[in-house]
Image (cartoon, rainbow, N blue to C red):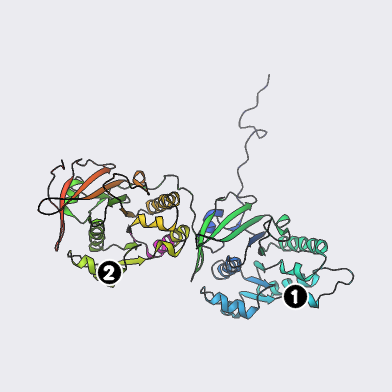
Amino acid sequence: MSTIALSDPVVRQAEPQTLPKAPSGVAGLDELTGGGLPKGRPTLVCGGPGCGKTMLATGFLVHGAVHQNEPGVFMSFDESAEDLRVNSGSLGYDLADLEERNLLAIDYVHLDRNDVEESGEFDLEGLFIRIDLAARKVGAKRVVLDTVDTIFSGLPNEAILRSELRRLFRWLKDRGLSTVITAERGKNAFTRHGIEEYVSDCVILLDHRVHGEVSTRRLRVVKYRGSTHGTNEYPFIIGTGGISVLPVTSLGLLHEVFEERIPSGVPGLDTLLEGKGYYKGSSILVSGGPGSGKTSFAAHFVNAACLRGENCLIFGFEEAPKQLIRNMRSIGINLGKWVDQGSLNCIAARPTDHGLETHLAEIHHTIQNYQPTVVVVDPISALLGGGTPDQARHLTLRLVDHLKSAGITAMFVNLQPGHAHLGANLSISSLMDIWMILRVFPNEEKNQRRIEIVKSRGMSHPLASHLFEITSEGTRVKSAERVS
C-alpha cells in the first residue's frame, strides 16, 4: 500500500494570503480590522443620524490624501460641498487646502423628488461619468459616496435603481478604487433599502444610543470578507482629531513583565515592600473609607515619579484639579509645580457626564497623547455612578489591561464602605498586583490610621497592619504593631 507524505502537494496546507488593506486613518479601527479597510473594494458604513458616518468617511479620504499618497473623491448626495468643508473644519480637516493641492475632489449631487420624472429606461450613467471625471482630475485611489440611499428617495423604481447601484459598485471595484459608502440604518436591516446585500466586502455599523440619560457611540465590524476582525461592539469618540475607536477585547495577558522597582513616595511603605517599592507596570489598589488617606498616598506616588522626571496623569472623578493641588500642599506636596512644568496632567470629570465606554475611550485617548509612565485613577469606585457594578468592573478590567500593555504603573483609589475587606459594590481586588487597605480606628486620645498590605504579587510583605500618620511634612508609616 502506498502512502502520501505530509510534504506531498496534494495534502500540503496552503499558506494564508493577506489581502491588501487601505489604512482608514481612524485611530483603533485599523487595529480591529488588521490594517484597514479592504483596498480596492467597497465598504458599507451604516447607522442612524448623528452617529458619525460622514466623519468616518471624511477621515478615510483625508488620511489617504495626506499620509498614503492616495487622492480621493467625495461624492455627496446629502450635504453641499461648502457645508462639508465647514463641518469638517471642526475636526481639524482642511478640505479646501486638499482641493487646492489637487488631492481631493468634492462633488455634490442634489436630487429633489419633485424634480424627478420617470420616463423610459433609467440608469446611473451620469453618475458614472461624474465620478470618473473627478477621479481622473486628481488621480483618485479612494472614493466616498455619502449618503447613497438618498438616491432612493428621489427615484420611484427601486428595483431598477438597485440594479444600477450594483453595476456602479462593480464599476468602482473593477477600477481598484477603495470605496466607502454611507447609508442610513433601517428598522429591520442594516440599511433602509438593503444596500448591504450587494455592498458586502466589509460592513461597519455605527450606533448612537442613550441609556439612563447618558449617550454612547459604538462601532461594530459586522462583516469583512477575507480578513479576521474584531466582532464585538467598541466605543468611539468624536474629537478635534476625528474619530477614535477603543478596542475593548482582552489583550490575552501577554503584556511585558518588568523587574525594575519604583518608589512609592512614602519611605516607610517602601520598607514594607522589600525596601524597593512597586514593580514597574504593576496595578495598585488603595482601598479605604472617607478620610483614611487614600489620595495622600496617590499624591506621594505621583510626586516621586515627577521628581524622577517622568510624565504622570491623574484622572479625578470627585475633586477639581485646583482643589487637589491646594489640599496636597497641606501635607507638603506641591503638585502645582509639576502641572506648571508639564510633567503632571490632571483630568477631572463626573462619571455621569458620559457613558462608561466613552470615559474609557477618552482615558485611552489622553494616555496615547500624553505618554505617561504613571497613572492614578481617583476614585475608581466613582464609576458606579455611570453604570452598573458589572459595567464598572468590566471597564476597570479593560483599563488595567491597556495600562499593563503600555508598561504604565497605575494606582487605583477605591472608596470602600465600612471596614469590609471587599467593597460592597465594586470587586476589583483580584485584578490588582498590590492591594492595600487604609483604615481609621477610634482611640481614647485620637483616631489611629493603619495600613494593611493584603496582597503583593512577586514580593514578600508583612501581614500585620501598620500605624501611619499624615503630617504637614507628608505621610509616615510609623510601626508594625498589629491591631488587636
User: What are the residue bounds of the magenta stretch?
Assistant: 363-375
Q: Position of residue 478 (x, y in %)?
A: 12, 51
Q: Mark 2 — residue?
A: 323
- Kindly identify which residue carries mark 1: 111
**Mark 1 or mark 2: whose residue is earlier in sequence:** 1
**Judging from the image, what secondary structure is the residue with disc 2 in?**
helix
Q: Where 127 sits versus 190, above or below?
A: below
Amino acid at the residue labelled 2: Gln
- Distance from disc 1 to disc 2, alpha carbons, whole Å, reads 56 Å
The amino acid type, in three-letter code, at marker 1 is Leu
Q: Work out which residue is located at the far left of the displayed protein and give it.
A: 445
Q: Is residue 369 magenta?
A: yes
Asked whether residue 326 is in view, the answer is: yes
The spot of residue 108 in percent (x, y) is 69, 76
Question: Which quadrant holds the N terminus?
Answer: top right
Q: Nearer the viewer, mark 1 or mark 2?
A: 2
Q: Residue at x 67, y 57 (%)?
A: 190
